[in-house]
């Protein structure tokens, strides 16, 4: 038996510091527990008993080597590893006096630590999960806030900060834990901790907080904002959430007495507190918004205290200067209607310079010309003030008003004086004139006048001087467009203008062909066109059009967005449209989403708001003879929106719907569910059968698969369809495929493409869709590739393409319509048995009927045999390989597997996480192989999986693994997978309660997304019968606790026989 820590105690106890620093502890004042690591070292934690609690830290950790009888390490929450820590020295004395090595002979927990990981798991997890707690923010009397760091219990925060100070990017190697796992603490968090160490008003190591003066709050918030999920409100425990978009705040000026006015902030929600600065920080509980108010801090403080009072003379300043600055930040300034303001002109003026001759002197006289027509002398800029009151000229009439001078005006005047360095500045500031005299005046002026054409001002040369100067002229193109005689065409004329000059397109075409440098006008002026590119742009428009007499051109309506795009991109192009085209432009821009859809009564209460808006958009396109792509995300109801439009097909007209073979009966099911008045036929079978179907009268909608269009092209070409609808339209993305070419040869009045992924890999896929919808709109394939795919600036090219196609694509994603979606959205995706499946299914069915239901049998039903037969049929519905290994486990042999891969592809494109359940583990193996062939990452779990939670964590936290294959029984309970928002049930289960357990893996408490549930059901098979039984006998199913046999024994003989019908 030996005293504990004796060697370390004797080495330290003889010093003067030791005897004066220690805390006198009596027996029982400290308690401890210990463990033994893989090297045999004792890890001992000492903590105070109740008698000394508050006088001793809540812990002190010691690592002791019993072989060498030496303390290897110690750690104090207040002093760290300091050898002079009085608490550590007190423990040495306490242990020597009251403990011995026999106290550690009791069995201890053994630990095993290796260093294969980058860092200590506890340490790195604490760094990642630690939070700071902000206190005092909502207390108006407090002059400081506190940031508590209790979550950093395993770390000495000062030691951490000291290491970070050395280099926040590369922490010092002495701090092994941090150096081993630098990713555990993000750079914004590092910068915040460093800022706190530099700017703290005080720190308490006992209560673990930094205090910061409130005057520094604006700076502090700038550092907190980038730290996601790091700072909480101490009073509520809520994490601060900083919004990237500024708060939509506005200001309002209202009367406050006889001659004063109050400026008020307009904030709709209840404000918890605010922090003045730039930006202004607004707190709505734990939600934080910025507002970039361009006001001084003291003015903002008065504004937020509702104490910003201004005089009548200040109204003009706020209406002009303040208003302009607020507008730059997207903040609206409103005035009460009863406030009378003097006349204010605050449009953006242009500098107008007039060159004229006065005897032997040449003068350039300047004025500021406002868009409203008001004109004031240029000398007002000499006051260097953005707001002036002066006399004006307006069409020969004079008056007096306030004028706003934007900063651009002052810099333009400086440029003017730089162009004429010998000008008399005083004359400019007194008379708004620059004068020129001397023998070489004309030569000097010619060069300078020509150079003036490069600046943003308007130069007018007197008529008698026009022939002496070459003037740079920026032309403006005016395109006057009106509705065409044909419904889907419009006509237009083109003219070019500058001041009093105007030219036709043919005149300019002749000039540019001549390759002359200057254009001679009829009145003798010499013109240099400074923006010839506007002519080139206009020429490209005309090349896309048909030319008629008298300079009139016509183009298809679908070209109109291209004209509007040019006008937006080039201010020198002006498009003037008649009322009808204006309305078309508005409808295309706003997508007509605010207009009500024309719907039959049976759909008024079925369609959701966004679906009605989609139908309105499709009807708008149809009204103008245009076509488009409905690109809503999977599960938002593209099918029902398309059928709502097709229901309005005129009597006697036929429409054609082309879709993948696996989706044909989904469309049929939707028609029968919602649109019973649409006579329809599915075109399938052998060639003779298809010919007969295509000749059937009184049909409004033909449904055919992509695979058959090429075969029946000659028959389909004879039809003049009212609508051709392509479902999963990306099937025609291959521009050189025969199937694509065949579909584009079909005739129709309207066309519609449905696709959640209209472009998957290459831009030419989008070109192919538009070549079907509106041939020629995106030009030829070669021209399209040269313009977009081969462009040097790909980002700019794609932006241009997006502007071209955006009016004709409508896409909504689930996040945008969350409020309209139910928490759990369930649907059935119907599959038709493939040829191989159907053959196997009928064979089993025939054998079952002979063996289990002989014609004259009256014996008892063998539920065991029936269950076995039903299982075989269900396996065939999944994949015939499950009952016949000779059939290859490929997607082509199972329409349901093909359907699943399609659903997964669309889900992955929408960045969803998907759970796929199947009862059959062997089927999951086939699905795994198909997913691997597609190159998708996934997680897998069945009854044999041992590390269940590791697999679940991988799915939850790995953004690349978005598919989780789960056997129904293995994943039915004990899993929380709320990261998933899509559940696919590959095969139906007898008991809906088991299915619901699987669905609840995703749809449960903690789920913040809407959950979509898809059941894959083979049409006409036992699977459809199971679904029907679930619906009709739901109450019975809910009372069944376990087993398929109990379910079967609860069914009547007629119910069981019905299961074997096909």
Image (cartoon, rainbow, N blue to C red):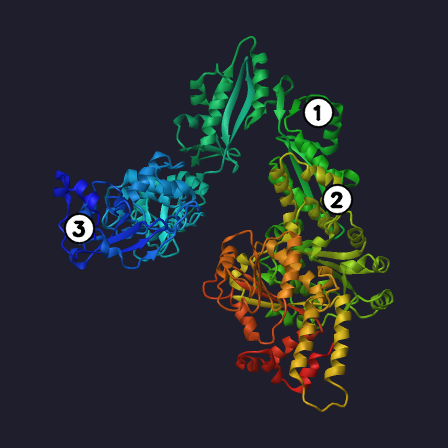
Q: Position of residue 28 (x, y in %)?
A: 17, 57
Pick whichever, 108 or 208, lies toward us.
108
Label 3, secondary structure: give it: helix
Q: Are marks 1 and 3 in contact (CB under 8 Å)?
A: no
Q: Residues within 10 Å of mark 1 (few under 14, many from 20)?
A: few
Q: Is residue 670 left or right of residue 40?
A: right
Q: Position of residue 203 (x, y in %)?
A: 24, 44
User: Residue 627's quadrant in the figure?
Assistant: bottom right
Q: Residue at x 82, y 67 (%)?
A: 685
> Disc 1 or 3, which lies upstream in sequence?
3
The extreme front residue here reads 1
Q: CA distance from mark 1 to mark 3?
A: 111 Å
From the image, state whether disc 1 or disc 3 is nearer to you.
3
Q: Are marks 2 and 3 in contact (CB under 8 Å)?
A: no
From the image, state whether disc 2 or disc 3 is nearer to you.
3
Q: CA distance from mark 2 to mark 1?
A: 30 Å
Label 2, secondary structure: give it: strand
Pick whichever, 926 or 205, lies toward us.
926
Q: Mark 2 — residue?
A: 554
Label 1, secondary structure: give it: loop
Pick whichever, 885 or 923, lies toward us.
885
Q: Is residue 919 above or below residue 472?
A: below
Q: CA distance from mark 2 to mark 3?
A: 101 Å
Q: Mark 3 — residue?
A: 94
Q: Is residue 974 above or below residue 513?
A: below
Q: Position of residue 634 (x, y in %)?
A: 61, 59
Pick whichever, 375 or 358, lies toward us.
375
Q: Is residue 629 left or right of residue 374?
A: right
Q: Mark 1 — residue?
A: 522
Q: Position of residue 566 (x, y in %)?
A: 64, 39
User: Residue 782's quadrant in the figure?
Assistant: top right
């Amino acid at each position: 038996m030996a005293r504990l820590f004796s060697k370390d105690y004797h080495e330290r106890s003889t010093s003067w510091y030791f005897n004066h620093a220690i805390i006198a502890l009596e027996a029982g004042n400290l308690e401890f527990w210990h463990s033994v690591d893989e090297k045999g070292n004792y890890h001992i934690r000492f903590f105070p008993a109740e008698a000394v609690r508050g006088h001793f830290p809540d812990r002190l950790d010691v690592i002791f080597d019993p072989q060498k009888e030496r303390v290897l390490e110690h750690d104090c929450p207040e002093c760290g590893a300091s050898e002079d820590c009085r608490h550590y020295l007190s423990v040495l004395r306490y242990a020597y006096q009251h403990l011995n090595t026999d106290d550690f002979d009791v069995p201890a927990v053994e630990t095993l630590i290796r260093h294969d990981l980058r860092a200590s798991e506890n340490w790195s997890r604490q760094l990642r999960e630690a939070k700071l707690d902000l206190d005092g923010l909502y207390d108006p009397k407090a002059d400081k806030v506190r940031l508590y760091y209790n979550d950093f219990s395993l770390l000495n925060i000062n030691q951490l900060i000291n290491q970070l100070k050395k280099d926040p990017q590369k922490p010092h190697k002495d701090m092994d834990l941090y150096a081993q796992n630098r990713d555990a603490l993000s750079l914004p968090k590092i910068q915040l901790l460093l800022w706190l160490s530099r700017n703290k008003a005080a720190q308490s190591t006992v209560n673990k907080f930094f205090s910061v003066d409130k005057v520094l709050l604006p700076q502090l918030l700038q550092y907190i904002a980038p730290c996601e999920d790091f700072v909480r409100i101490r009073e509520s425990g809520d994490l601060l959430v900083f919004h990237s978009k500024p708060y939509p705040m506005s200001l309002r000026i209202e009367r406050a007495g006889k001659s004063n006015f109050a400026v008020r902030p307009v904030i709709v929600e209840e404000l918890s507190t605010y922090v003045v600065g730039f930006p202004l920080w607004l707190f709505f509980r734990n939600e934080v918004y910025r507002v970039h108010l361009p006001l001084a801090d003291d003015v903002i403080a008065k504004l937020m205290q509702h104490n910003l009072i201004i005089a009548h003379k200040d109204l003009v300043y706020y209406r002009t200067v303040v208003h302009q600055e607020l507008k730059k930040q997207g903040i609206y300034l409103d005035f009460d209607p009863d406030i009378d303001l003097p006349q204010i002109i605050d449009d953006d003026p242009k500098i107008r310079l007039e060159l004229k001759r006065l005897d032997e002197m040449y003068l350039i006289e300047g004025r500021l010309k406002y868009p409203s027509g008001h004109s004031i002398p240029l000398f007002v800029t000499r006051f260097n003030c953005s707001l002036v009151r002066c006399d004006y000229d307006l069409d020969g009439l004079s008056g007096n008003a306030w004028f706003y001078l934007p900063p651009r005006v002052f810099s333009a005047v400086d440029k003017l004086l730089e162009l004429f360095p010998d000008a008399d500045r005083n004359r400019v500031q007194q008379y708004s004139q620059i004068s020129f005299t001397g023998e070489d005046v004309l030569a000097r002026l010619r060069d300078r006048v020509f150079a003036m054409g490069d600046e943003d001002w308007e130069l007018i040369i007197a008529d008698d001087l026009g022939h002496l100067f070459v003037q740079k002229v920026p032309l403006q193109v005016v395109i006057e467009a009106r509705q065409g005689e044909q419904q889907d065409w419009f006509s237009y004329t083109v003219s070019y203008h500058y001041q009093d000059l105007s030219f036709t397109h043919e005149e300019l075409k002749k000039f540019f062909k001549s390759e002359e440098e200057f254009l001679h006008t009829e009145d003798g002026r010499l013109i240099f066109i400074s923006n010839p590119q506007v002519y080139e742009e206009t020429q490209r428009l005309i090349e896309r059009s048909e030319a008629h007499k008298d300079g009139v051109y016509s183009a298809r309506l679908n070209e109109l967005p291209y004209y509007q795009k040019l006008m937006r991109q080039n201010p020198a192009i002006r498009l003037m449209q008649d009322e009808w085209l204006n309305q078309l432009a508005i409808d295309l821009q706003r997508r007509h989403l605010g207009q009500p859809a024309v719907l039959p009564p049976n759909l008024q209460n079925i369609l959701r708001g966004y679906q009605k808006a989609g139908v309105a958009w499709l009807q708008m396109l149809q009204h103008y003879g245009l076509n488009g792509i409905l690109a809503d995300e999977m599960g938002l109801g593209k099918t029902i929106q398309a059928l709502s439009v097709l229901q309005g097909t005129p009597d006697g007209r036929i429409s054609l719907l082309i879709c993948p073979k696996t989706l044909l009966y989904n469309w049929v099911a939707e028609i029968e569910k919602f649109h019973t008045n649409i006579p329809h036929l599915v075109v399938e079978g052998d060639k003779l059968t298809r010919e007969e179907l295509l000749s059937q009268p009184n049909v409004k909608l033909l449904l055919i698969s992509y695979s058959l269009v090429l075969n029946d092209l000659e028959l389909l070409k004879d039809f003049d369809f009212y609508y051709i609808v392509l479902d999963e339209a990306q099937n025609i993305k291959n521009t050189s495929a025969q199937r694509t070419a065949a579909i584009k040869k079909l005739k129709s009045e309207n066309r519609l493409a449905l696709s959640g992924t209209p472009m998957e890999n290459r831009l030419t896929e989008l070109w192919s869709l538009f070549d079907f919808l509106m041939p020629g709109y995106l030009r030829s394939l070669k021209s399209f590739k040269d313009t977009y795919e081969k462009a040097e600036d790909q980002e700019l090219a794609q932006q241009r393409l997006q502007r071209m196609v955006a009016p004709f694509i409508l896409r909504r994603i689930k996040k945008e319509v969350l409020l309209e979606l139910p928490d759990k959205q369930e649907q059935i995706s119907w599959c038709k048995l493939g040829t191989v499946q159907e053959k196997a299914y009928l064979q089993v069915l025939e054998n079952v009927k002979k063996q289990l239901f002989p014609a004259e049998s009256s014996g008892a039903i063998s539920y065991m045999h029936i269950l076995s037969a039903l299982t075989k049929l269900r396996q065939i519905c999944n994949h015939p390989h499950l009952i016949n290994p000779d059939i290859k486990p490929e997607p082509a042999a199972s329409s349901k597997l093909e359907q699943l891969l399609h659903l997964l592809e669309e889900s992955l494109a929408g960045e969803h996480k998907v759970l796929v359940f199947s009862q059959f583990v062997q089927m999951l193996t086939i699905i795994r192989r198909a997913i691997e062939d597609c190159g998708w990452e996934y997680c897998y779990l069945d009854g044999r999986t041992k590390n269940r939670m590791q697999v679940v964590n991988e799915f939850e936290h790995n953004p690349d693994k978005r598919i989780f294959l789960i056997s129904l029984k293995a994943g039915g309970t004990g899993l929380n997978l709320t990261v998933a928002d899509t559940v696919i049930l590959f095969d139906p289960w007898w008991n809906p309660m088991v299915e619901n357990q699987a669905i609840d893996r995703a749809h449960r408490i903690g789920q913040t997304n809407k959950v979509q549930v898809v059941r894959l059901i083979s049409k006409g098979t036992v699977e459809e019968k199971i679904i029907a039984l679930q619906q009709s006998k739901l109450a019975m199913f809910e009372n069944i606790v376990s087993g398929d046999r109990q379910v079967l024994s609860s069914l009547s003989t007629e119910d069981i026989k019905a299961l074997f019908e096909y």
